[in-house]
Image: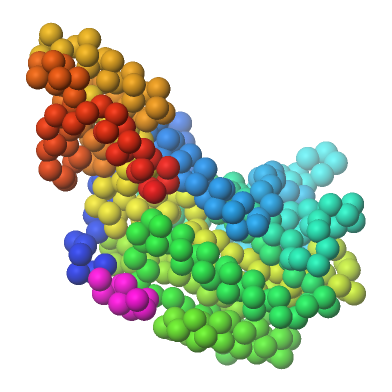
């Protein structure tokens, strides 16, 4: 099935998205209007934190399966580093003010690539990285960007964010064919990840330098070569795309996967970028021909959650749901048996709650009465599904185990 066919199928089977902030009013996942925080800085409530951590755990596991070396780097960096990489020059308006200390100046990082470059250099010198294969770093990176207050929008655009950020370092002197091979791997990884979350991509764009916009970090010939590579990548994989002039990163062209939010505004979710210059700027090593693939398979956790809530009408998939089962007793005499069912679910590591308000739309509601207690069975209904009467406990546990682990 082509990308256009998948998009048409999604539009046919799905209603107009609901604003994720409206969904949040009944699901109670997060707050962004408390006095304890500022605009664009999210306070996660318990259920939202469970959802966020479930996504984080899944994505880190997928990064590992795809050969990435997981790291965790600090949100504060030496301000001089961001000047060296030219980020200060091109992104100054979206960076927080430099913190001037006695012996050093620090700054909230807007991205993690400078640190990943330094990490690669150090690990390479220590001979920790394997030779002959591209080094891959993956991180759920905490970033700070001084977004204009007028552009802030719930989880979709925030000032403190968790970006699913990855960098692949390719030595072109070893094997020039590795670049296209890794770009294909990244493209397939991105598509599979978005499909896993049932994300509808509205369009894919190839952002190029364009005319009239100055980029001091690359020469025209380099721009043309890199744009040709990404153009070829999309054509070979038969992916329809739009070319966007003047929207490239300052260090190279990029492919963006864009969604249409509940207000019909285009927003970037995933991205693939190629960059032949930052490595030499940071390391001062002009001999090595290292090209970096910057990519994020699904953007920030915050925007990803907003997209899932909107596109799925608040129906969070079972494997991600903060509360997977509700256990309800319909008679007082069945309370002991109800508690036993609840405890069995908890022992099997399902996120369960006993007799509470139902606010999430993706969980199983288990009801226990005299008949169920007598026959050692349960009656259940998945919200949006049909009621099932008198199922054996073990059979029900087996059924939801298949949904538990990342939706399988």
The x, y position of residue 68, in whole percent, is 66, 55
94, 229: nearer the viewer: 229
- Give the residue at x 81% y 56%: 129
- Give the residue at x 33% y 18%: 343
The x, y position of residue 333, in whole percent, is 13, 8
User: Does 212 sit above or below residue 354?
Assistant: below
Residue 318's image quarter? top left
From which residue to which does the magenta span run?
1-9
Give the prevailing secondary structure in the magenta stretch.
helix
Q: What's the image's color scheme?
A: rainbow
Residue 183's image quarter? bottom right
The x, y position of residue 96, in whole percent, is 61, 51
Q: Is residue 6 left or right of residue 35?
A: left
User: Does 122 sit above or below residue 275?
Assistant: above
Q: Is residue 303 left or right of residue 286?
A: left
* Quadrant of image for the N terminus: bottom left
User: Does 98 sit above or below residue 381?
Assistant: below
Q: Is residue 287 left or right of residue 200?
A: right
The x, y position of residue 326, in whole percent, is 25, 28
- Give the residue at x 53% y 71%: 187
Q: Reply yes or no: does residue 6 show up in magenta.
A: yes
306, 322: nearer the viewer: 322
- Give the residue at x 26% y 42%: 362
The count of marks equals 0
User: Does 392 sit above or below residue 193?
Assistant: above
Q: Reply yes or no: does residue 7 show up in magenta.
A: yes
């Amino acid at each position: 099935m082509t990308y256009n066919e998948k998009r048409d199928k999604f539009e046919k089977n799905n209603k107009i998205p609901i604003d994720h902030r409206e969904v949040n009013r009944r699901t109670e996942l997060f707050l962004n209007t408390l006095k304890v925080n500022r605009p664009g800085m999210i306070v996660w409530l318990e259920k939202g934190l469970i959802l966020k951590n479930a996504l984080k755990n899944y994505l880190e596991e997928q990064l590992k399966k795809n050969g990435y070396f997981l790291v965790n780097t600090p949100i504060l960096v030496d301000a001089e580093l961001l000047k060296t990489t030219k980020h200060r020059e091109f992104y100054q308006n979206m960076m927080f003010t430099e913190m001037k200390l006695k012996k050093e100046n620090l700054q909230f990082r807007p991205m993690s690539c400078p640190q990943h470059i330094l990490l690669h250099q150090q690990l390479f010198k220590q001979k920790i990285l394997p030779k002959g294969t591209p080094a891959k770093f993956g991180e759920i990176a905490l970033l700070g960007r001084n977004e204009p207050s007028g552009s802030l929008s719930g989880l979709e655009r925030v000032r403190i964010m968790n970006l699913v950020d990855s960098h692949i370092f390719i030595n072109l002197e070893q094997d020039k064919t590795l670049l296209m091979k890794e770009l294909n791997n990244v493209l397939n990884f991105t598509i599979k990840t978005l499909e896993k979350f049932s994300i509808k991509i509205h369009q894919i764009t190839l952002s190029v330098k364009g005319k009239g916009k100055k980029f001091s970090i690359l020469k025209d010939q380099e721009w043309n070569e890199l744009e040709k590579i990404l153009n070829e990548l999309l054509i070979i994989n038969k992916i329809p795309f739009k070319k966007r002039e003047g929207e490239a990163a300052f260090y190279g062209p990029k492919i963006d996967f864009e969604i249409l939010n509940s207000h019909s505004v285009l927003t970037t979710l995933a991205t693939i970028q190629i960059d032949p210059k930052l490595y030499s700027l940071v390391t001062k090593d002009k001999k090595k021909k290292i090209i970096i693939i910057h990519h994020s398979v699904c953007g920030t956790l915050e925007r990803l959650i907003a997209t899932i809530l909107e596109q799925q009408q608040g129906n969070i998939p079972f494997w991600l749901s903060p509360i997977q089962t509700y256990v309800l007793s319909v008679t007082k005499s069945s309370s002991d048996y109800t508690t036993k069912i609840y405890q069995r679910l908890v022992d099997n590591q399902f996120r369960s709650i006993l007799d509470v308000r139902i606010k999430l739309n993706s969980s199983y509601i288990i009801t226990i009465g005299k008949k169920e207690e007598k026959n050692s069975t349960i009656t259940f209904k998945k919200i949006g599904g049909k009621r099932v009467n008198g199922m054996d406990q073990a059979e029900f546990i087996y059924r939801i185990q298949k949904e538990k682990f990342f939706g399988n």
